[in-house]
């Protein structure tokens, strides 16, 4: 696997080697020993799968008191994935990075604890698998409006495609 820092250096793109032949493909998508070298010493406690239809935008979500690190991989489809640095003492506080994850490429994105996360579905549907470093707690979850002017995220919204948002994401406050 290859590990590459993105525009926010703590957000890491992981590119596995995909073995393909006439039968299909195989890839190793997580190896703890390598992950610790390139991403840090984290322990995963929860795995989630999200399925969303085209035009769905989820986020931007983060946990205030028990922040979750997330290792994200698209199993089917294509998304634009976004991370926002919410760590108040970080030199990149309030900065964002976005990356297109496509199931055919098999890439994973490591978003460490202290970042808000969201994604937009660009394909007919997308199945996203993600590992978390802490348990989900509804009471601890916070949201930032996906289109906060100060964040200036260049979402690649599809023309003439309805945007699907949860009520919570619609009324989330802007980043300030």
Image (cartoon, rainbow, N blue to C red):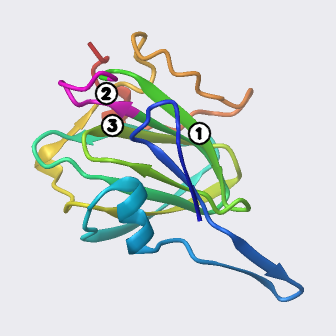
Counting residues from the start of the chain, the first of labels 3 and 1 encountered is: 1
Residue furthest to the right in view is 22
In the structure shown, which secondary structural element does the residue marked by tag 1 occupy? strand
Q: Between 97 and 47, which is closer to the camera in this rendering?
A: 97
- Label of residue 99 in the image: 1
Magenta span covers which residues? 84-92
Residue 21 placement (x, y as % from top left): 86, 83
Separation (CA) of disc 3 from disc 1:
14 Å
Quadrant assignment for the N terminus: bottom right
* Residue that sits furthest to the front in the current view: 37
Location of residue 108 by image quarter? bottom right
Residue depicted at 51% across the width and 21% down the height: 153
Q: Is residue 59 left or right of residue 73?
A: left
Q: Which residue is mark 2?
A: 144
Q: Can residue 166 be seen here? A: no
Label 3 CA crowd tier, 10 Å (few <14, some 14–19, many 20+): many
Q: Quadrant of the C terminus?
A: top left
SS type, badge 3:
strand
Q: Is residue 97 above or below residue 4?
A: above
**Is 86 left, or right, of 126 in this rendering?**
left
Labels 2 & 1 near each other (Cβ < 8 A): no
Q: Against 166, is 51 above or below?
A: below
Q: Earlier in the sequence, mark 2 or mark 3?
A: 3
User: Residue 50: x percent and y percent?
Assistant: 46, 61
């Amino acid at each position: 696997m290859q590990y590459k820092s993105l525009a926010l250096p703590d957000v890491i793109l992981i590119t596995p080697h995909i073995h393909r032949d006439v039968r299909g493909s195989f890839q190793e998508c997580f190896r703890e020993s390598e992950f610790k070298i390139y991403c840090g010493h984290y322990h995963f406690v929860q795995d989630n799968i999200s399925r969303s239809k085209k035009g769905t935008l989820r986020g931007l979500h983060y946990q205030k008191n028990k922040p979750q690190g997330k290792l994200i991989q698209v199993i089917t489809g294509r998304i634009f994935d976004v991370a926002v640095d919410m760590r108040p003492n970080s030199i990149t506080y309030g900065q964002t990075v976005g990356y297109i994850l496509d199931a055919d490429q098999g890439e994973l994105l490591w978003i460490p604890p202290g970042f808000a996360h969201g994604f937009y579905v660009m394909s007919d549907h997308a199945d996203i698998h993600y590992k978390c470093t802490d348990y989900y707690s509804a009471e601890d979850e916070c949201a930032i409006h996906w289109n906060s002017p100060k964040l200036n995220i260049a979402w690649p919204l599809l023309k003439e495609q309805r945007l699907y948002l949860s009520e919570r994401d619609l009324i989330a406050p802007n980043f300030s």
